[in-house]
Image: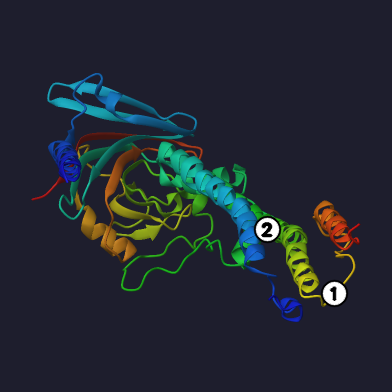
Amino acid sequence: MKTKKLFSIIILSLAVIIFIAYASNLPKLFKFDKKDALSEWQEKIFKNRVLYTVELKEDGGQLVAKSKSACSGLIYNIRFDPKKYPLISWKWKVLKFPEKNYYASALLPKKSVSLWEKILTAIGLKSRPLKPKPANAPVAEKNAKSGWLERDDYAARIYVIFPSWIFSNIKAIEYVWSDDLPKGTIMTSPYFSNIKLIVVESGKKDNDEWVYEERNIYEDYKRAFGVNPSGVGAIALMTDTDNTLSTAEALYTDIKVGYEK
Amino acid sequence: MIKFNDRRKKFFANPMHRQTFMLVLMAALVPATIVTICLYYLIFGITSAEVGFPEAIAYNIIPAAERVTAILLLTAPLALLIILIFAYKITHRIVGPFDRIVYELDAHIKDRRKGHIRIRKSDKFHALVEKINHLLDKIKLPVD
């Protein structure tokens, strides 16, 4: 009986410690105002390396991302409940958009469909590239457009990642700044049906000022996927030009995550 | 008493046959299941967590997992079927003669049968049957 009580107390204490550890970490603010500000982020390189550097200014700091036919991103693992802490905000600025022309796209090797994929698709174990959108979700399916995969480069994007025990069930929302797609567009990634892209800014801004964004992760997830979200596991940012084989440059600052109004 | 005519209609000759067969089946299935879980949720799962970005997971890890799944789906049922056939045959050869020996001894005790106990060539326990037959011969020798 005593052992059971002791065991229950230990479990309860651990749960409280974990809860406090998570709660005390929130909200998390990234101001990029220190030289070693990127030390808490993990860099993931997929194709060449995007140059991510911190620039210190008098009024704070900024993260500069310069991409030249490259695809790499920065990821920060943070766990919280998006229902309780639904907001994410950041400031960004795009200095140069990727050039989305079809000549560069033609140089890229096409992904061939293997025999295995054909078999899996035929027996229903592999979903077809374009899954129908969930009912009641106002998702604009733009990805049927030819060549869209090759144009899947954005000057700036912020990820909110929802991990899963089953690795193939990982989901993500990407807030992108597109040069050509209209603001408010929600679409499915050409790579994976579990990734929804939300265009939060479109085109070049006339004045060279920071653009402030604040998004409700919980509501965006529900709109994009049509169901309630699970826990957030990480946030990430990326400036990529590997598909368009061009260059892009963007600035990020004051990323704040895990808070409520 | 065991009825041999009914036995042929059943998949398992007796409970011992079923138990031995299930043991062999479990010995094949349990390690295979553990390996599959380790493969998916330790190798693919940990790699996915390490990669982090969903596009990279979708482009690199999921196709690899799908290929492994396809190979498993094609080979595992075949391998399992072969194991089951062999397991059934081997366990039948082990357990089948046991019932036969019991039946034959019972017949000898009740004087319904005389002579040696016979089992199939492919059956196990030939040494045991040989000793029993030797014992039967000895018992039936006239006492000097």
- Determine whether the residue tagged by mark 2 lies in a helix, strand or loop: helix
Q: Is residue A99 visible?
A: no
Q: Earlier in the sequence, mark 2 or mark 1?
A: 2
Residues at discs 2 and 1 in contact (Cβ within 8 Å): no
Q: Residues within 10 Å of mark 1 (few under 14, many from 20)?
A: few
Kind of residue indicated by mark 1: Arg
- Determine whether the residue tagged by mark 1 lies in a helix, strand or loop: loop
Task: Give the numbered dot on residue B113.
Answer: 1
Kind of residue indicated by mark 2: Leu
Whether residue A36 sits left or right of residue B99 in the image: it is left
The colour mode here is: rainbow
Snapshot quadrant of residue A75? top left
Q: Which residue is mark 2?
A: B80
Snapshot quadrant of residue B120? bottom right
Q: Where residue B116 sits: x, y (%)?
A: 89, 65
Q: Where residue B65 sits: x, y (%)?
A: 55, 49
Q: Is residue A78 visible?
A: yes
Snapshot quadrant of residue B96? bottom right
Identity of the residue drawn at 78% across and 63% down? B97
